[in-house]
């Protein structure tokens, strides 16, 4: 599971909103190797078994694709409440 910037848990196949590009899309692939979660103060010195930040690919509704982590997306509901979509 991936935690979005607004605190929602999402996974493969979920619709999310990429607020850097201001586009909605679907999570189509998840990298199985976690990375340090810098939003929680983790660094490369943090023991790997504590890493919980996964990168994943999103296919936007317009067909473009990008690689993101949870701090770069929010739920579609949150984006709608902010008037972003």
Image: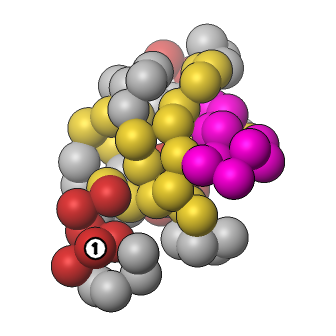
Q: Position of residue 54 (x, y in %)?
A: 56, 32
| As drawn, 22 above or below 16 | below
Which region shows up in magenta?
A: 55-66
| As drawn, 46 above or below 76 | above
- Seen from the viewer's position, the closer of residues 63 and 27 is 63
How many numbered marks does the figure carry? 1
The residue where tag 1 is placed is 80
- Seen from the viewer's position, the closer of residues 43 and 29 is 29
Is 75 displayed left or right of 48 in the figure? left
- Seen from the viewer's position, the closer of residues 31 and 41 is 31
Q: Is residue 24 visible?
A: yes
Q: Position of residue 45 (x, y in %)?
A: 66, 39
Identify the residue at the far bottom of this view: 83
Residue 64 located within the stretch drawn in magenta? yes
Q: Quadrant of the N terminus?
A: top left
Q: Residue at x 53, y 46 (%)?
A: 25
Q: Residue at x 58, y 64 (%)?
A: 23
Q: What colouring style does the render use?
A: secondary structure
Q: Position of residue 59 (x, y in %)?
A: 66, 39
Q: Splitting the image into 4 quarters, where does residue 10 fall?
A: top left
Q: Quadrant of the C terminus?
A: bottom left
| As drawn, 4 above or below 32 | below
Q: Residue at x 33, y 86 (%)?
A: 83
Category of crowding for the residue at label 1, using alpha-carbon neighbours closer than 10 angstroms: few (below 14), some (14–19), many (at least 20):
few
Q: Is residue 68 visible?
A: no
Identify the residue at the far top of this view: 32
Residue 65 located within the stretch drawn in magenta? yes
Which secondary structure class fits the magenta region best? strand
């Amino acid at each position: 599971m991936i935690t979005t910037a607004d605190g929602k848990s999402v996974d493969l196949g979920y619709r999310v909103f990429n607020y850097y590009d201001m586009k909605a899309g679907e999570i189509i692939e998840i990298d199985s190797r976690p990375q340090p979660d810098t939003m929680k103060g983790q660094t490369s010195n943090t023991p790997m078994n504590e890493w919980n930040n996964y990168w994943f690919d999103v296919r936007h509704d317009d067909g473009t694709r990008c690689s993101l982590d949870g701090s770069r997306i929010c739920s579609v509901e949150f984006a709608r409440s902010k008037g972003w979509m």
